[in-house]
Each structure stands twice: as C-alpha cells, then as structure tokens.
Amino acid sequence: MLKASCTVITQKELSEILGVHQTTISGVLSRRPGVRVSPETRRRILEAVEQYGYKPSLQARILRQGRSQLIGVLNFMPGNQGLEKMLRTVEMLQEKGFSPLVNEIFRPERAMESLQLFLDLKVSGVILKSLPRPIADQLKKVLLEMPVPAVCVEGAYIEGLPWVYPDKAGAMEELTLGLIGKGYRRLALMPSWKAGSVPVPNYSHAQELTRGFQAAVEKSVHRLESVEIIRKLVVSQENDPSERNFCNGRETTRQLIAERRNLPEVLICNDDPWALGAMTACFEAGIKVPAEIALTGFGNSQAGRFSPIALTTVNQPLGEMIRRAVSILCAAIEARTKPEPGMIKVPPCEVIYRQSTRVVTDEQESV
C-alpha cells in the first residue's frame, strides 16, 4: 500500500484519524502485554501505520517511560560464529517487540565506551555475548550497578548476573570418549591459553575443554598409549581478530610438525578456526588428514562444515541459549526489576563426526 503523504505523522494525528486512543495505538505497536483490543481495531491500527508511514518517537518514549524499546547487544566474538549468534539474537529480540542495538567489540578498551553509549540511549536491557574474562573484570562494577537488567551468554561468568552457558566439558568428554572408541590411542588437546600459562580458576572455554578431556582420559587410561595437553602455543600477531584463531592453529601445528618425529594420532583443537589452521599446516607439510593425523574442532562453523575435509566438531545449542537469555531479559524488563542471578546450563551439545576423523557412518556425517 502506498503511503498517503511524505509528511511525518504524529501519534496524536494518527489517533484522530482512527478515532482510537493514543494509549491503545502505543500498546499495539509495542506489543505490550495486557492491552485489550479487538482484532479489527488492531488491523486498522497496523494498516494505518503502514499507510501513513508512522514511526514511533524514540525521544517521546524515553521521556514518557524513562526507557526505550532498545536492547543493547555487546558481541565479543568476531567472525562467522559471532555473526550467527548476533543474527539470532536480533531476530528473537525483534519477535519480542524490541529493537536491538548491536555493537561488536574487537578491542577490550572499547567495551566500556559501548556500554556507556547504551546507557546514554536509555536501553531497556543489555545482552553480553561471549564476554572474555579480562573484559568481564573491567565491566563488572558498572554492569552490577546499571539501572537496567543485563544477561550474559557464554563467555565469562559475572557473579550477580544471570549467565546462560553450554555444557562444553560434557561435550568434550563425549567427543574424546568417541575418538577413543574409534581406536585412537595417542591423543593431544590444543586449547587456547597462552604459552606458559595455566587455566584461571574461573570458567573459560579452554578450561572447560581441558576438564572434559581429562575426565574422558581418566575413564580410558588403560586403553591409551599417550596423552598430552599442548601448552607451548605460537600466538599469532595477526591484526585481524577474525583470523587470529586460524593463524594460532596453523603456527602452533607448524611448530609441532617441525619439532616432533611422532605426531599424535588425533589433535583435538580449541575451536573450528584453530582446527582449520592446523589442517592448513598439515597440507603445507604434506601430512594427510585424517590418514596420518586426525583433527577435531569445536563450534560447528560454516567454514568447518564446508571445508574440503569437513571437520569433526561439537555443535552448541545456540538457539536455545539465546532463547533463554532473551526470555530472562524480557521478563525482567516487563517486571521492571533485575533478573535472578545464577548459572543456567543449557544442554545438550552435539558431537558431529565428519571426514577429518576416520571413516564413519552416513548418519554420523550428517550436519
């Protein structure tokens, strides 16, 4: 339907045209629960909004309610996996009647600036995705004192906030036991902490992978020839954050190949980009995957799925994690309160076997 005019129309004018109270129009457009309106009136309002090109005033809403329908989303995971999470978050928030304001962070020093921007714009709530521990420590005080609710998804846990996370340790234990069951006897785990460091006492991706790996090894120690957690990593100086993990995996595997005569039968990598970097190093050295060394990732990225040798990996319950986080945040916004803090584990992760490990059944190879 063509718009009747290029002139900006106000809600008051729309109310006069329809003969409907402004409160009813506002309730329909914001999908506010408890607004009683007939299907016919709702239809007339929505058609008039389209016809006259009405746009709700953000400034008026902030002045009236002290908040907007904006939700600030701080995304701390660059690359395809971060993009997929961000898009799902945007979609779910839009379904709830909110407008997501997304800021993807590549540098820790920009985190506080982004959070302050959200507060200046009177967002109704904040979702923090894949929050690294250093940034979590930097933002903790501000997040706990904010006048709006916040929810963390994966990444670091901040005591005092709700935190939705997947069972990575359980998934890594399942993956490792599965590899042992396929006949692998020389295993190496390549998690992401820097050379010479050890896992911090807080939750971290590397620590959870290590915990699950060690649990599987303890259950099968009598069946194994050698087990190793590789801590001597080559940290890439790649400036593009979206390529850094790939480069870390490639450079560390190059070093592994150069220094050792006997490689592990299977190299269990920190995530899919690390595994694809390791695969590239193997190709460059003339080492066949999976005939001479098998590789696994974590995250089920598109790059891993469509690589010439598709990656065995772990698929996280991304949709369910975001659904839970959005639900918690929206409930707190509606109740005008802070959400109950705590750790909310979302099971299960799914182990997916593909060509980067030994030949498996067609059912296991499915995405």
Image: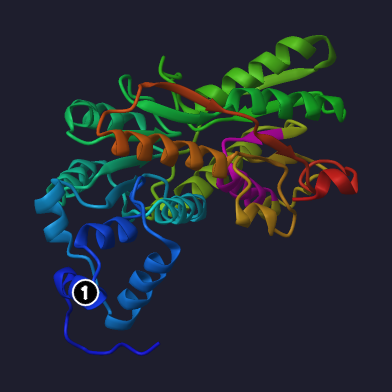
- The magenta span reads 267-282
Majority secondary structure in the magenta region: helix
Residue named by callout 1: 14
Q: Is residue 230 visible?
A: no
> Circle 1 — which element?
helix
Q: Quadrant of residue 258?
A: top right
The reply to whether the magenta stretch includes residue 248 is no
Q: Residue at x 27, y 52 (%)?
A: 70
The reply to whether the magenta stretch includes residue 280 is yes
Q: Nearer the viewer, residue 212 or 338?
A: 338
Q: Nearer the viewer, residue 252 or 303?
A: 303
Q: What coloring was used for the rendering?
A: rainbow
Q: Is residue 336 above or below residue 245?
A: above
Is residue 123 found left or right of 353 in the rendered image?
Answer: left
Callout 1 crowding tier (Cα within 10 Å): few <14, some 14–19, many ≥20: some
Q: Is residue 183 above or below residue 3?
A: above
Q: Residue at x 65, y 34 (%)?
A: 349
Q: Nearer the viewer, residue 104 or 120?
A: 120
Q: Is residue 147 above or below residue 63?
A: above
Q: Indicate the position of residue 98 as horizontal and vertical percent values.
A: 34, 53
Q: Residue at x 39, y 51 (%)?
A: 241
